[in-house]
């Protein structure tokens, strides 16, 4: 018999695959899958219960599901969808409330308060501190370009560098394992932009 988490995972992935517009090259099924895969790294060696890890995974599943309906306030809509689905499966009010807080904590600028909120925020932006940062970043660039959030690559490069410089991981794992890599990305990007600027003069 499938667990409640398995039931929710199946329902969310089906909705993302069927209802999510192709324009969302970054906020995709793959992003949610990558987040779920990152959970163990962030939670091992931490005093976190199995129940908390289950709620963290539910929050991850639903945190971007609102994009399947609208990009506006997608965190709020995702939290509402999580509550509806969890209620049907008999989760408690306290459990639904925790998932709602976790989802809303991912809204940028991030301001996590609890250990689990710090973890979900870091997992959501985990790619910033990974070697494959450029590959994931390119997907977000394409998405923003298609949505009209940016006009060209020059604008993207300026905004992305500012975002990276202002970002700091929150959790113990994020600070130890991701922050140093993020700082290396910043150095490299600055050098590349400087070379590009020098080359144009």
Image (cartoon, rainbow, N blue to C red):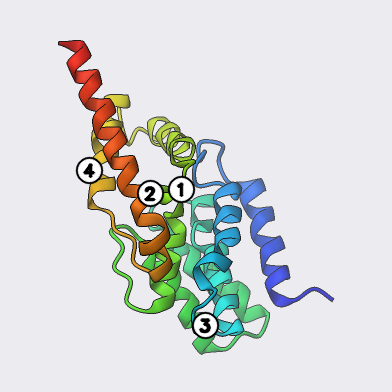
Does residue 11 appear left or right of residue 35 in this picture? right
Image disc number at residue 199 = none
Q: Are marks 2 and 1 in contact (CB under 8 Å)?
A: yes
Q: Are marks 1 and 4 in contact (CB under 8 Å)?
A: no
- Disc 4 is placed on an element classified as helix
Q: Residues within 10 Å of mark 1 (few under 14, many from 20)?
A: some
Q: Nearer the viewer, mark 4 or mark 3?
A: 3
- Quadrant for the C terminus in the image: top left
In 3D space, how far apart are the residues under numbered discs 4 and 2 (Cα atoms)?
A: 16 Å
Q: Which residue does the numbered mark 3 point to in the structure image?
A: 48
In 3D space, how far apart are the residues under numbered discs 1 and 4 (Cα atoms)?
A: 18 Å
Q: Which residue does the numbered mark 2 point to in the structure image?
A: 181
Q: Are marks 1 and 3 in contact (CB under 8 Å)?
A: no
**Which residue is painted at 54% across and 50% down in the image?**
31
Q: Which residue does the numbered mark 1 point to in the structure image?
A: 130
Q: Quadrant of residue 154?
A: top left
Q: Earlier in the sequence, mark 2 or mark 3?
A: 3
Front in this rendered view, residue 138 or 90: 138
Q: Earlier in the sequence, mark 4 or mark 3?
A: 3
Q: Earlier in the sequence, mark 1 or mark 4?
A: 1
Q: Which residue does the numbered mark 4 point to in the structure image?
A: 162
- Disc 2 is placed on an element classified as helix
Residue 160 is situated, as x and y percent measured from the top left of the image, at 29, 39
């Amino acid at each position: 018999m499938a667990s409640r988490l398995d039931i929710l995972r199946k329902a969310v992935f089906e909705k993302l695959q069927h209802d999510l517009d192709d324009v969302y090259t970054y906020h995709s099924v793959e992003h949610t899958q990558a987040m779920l895969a990152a959970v163990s790294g962030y939670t091992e060696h931490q005093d976190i219960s199995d129940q908390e890890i289950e709620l963290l995974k539910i929050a991850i599943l639903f945190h971007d599901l609102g994009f399947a309906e609208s990009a506006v306030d997608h965190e709020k809509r995702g939290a509402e969808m999580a509550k509806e689905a969890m209620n049907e499966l008999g989760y408690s009010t306290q459990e639904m409330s925790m998932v709602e807080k976790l989802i809303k904590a991912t809204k940028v600028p991030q301001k996590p308060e609890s250990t689990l909120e710090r973890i979900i925020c870091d997992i959501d932006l985990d790619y910033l501190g990974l070697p494959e940062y450029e590959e994931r970043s390119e997907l977000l660039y394409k998405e923003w370009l298609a949505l009209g959030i940016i006009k060209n690559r020059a604008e993207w490069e300026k905004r992305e560098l500012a975002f990276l410089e202002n970002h700091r991981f929150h959790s113990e794992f994020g600070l130890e394992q991701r922050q140093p890599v993020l700082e290396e990305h910043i150095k490299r990007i600055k050098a590349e932009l400087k070379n590009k600027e020098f080359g144009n003069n």
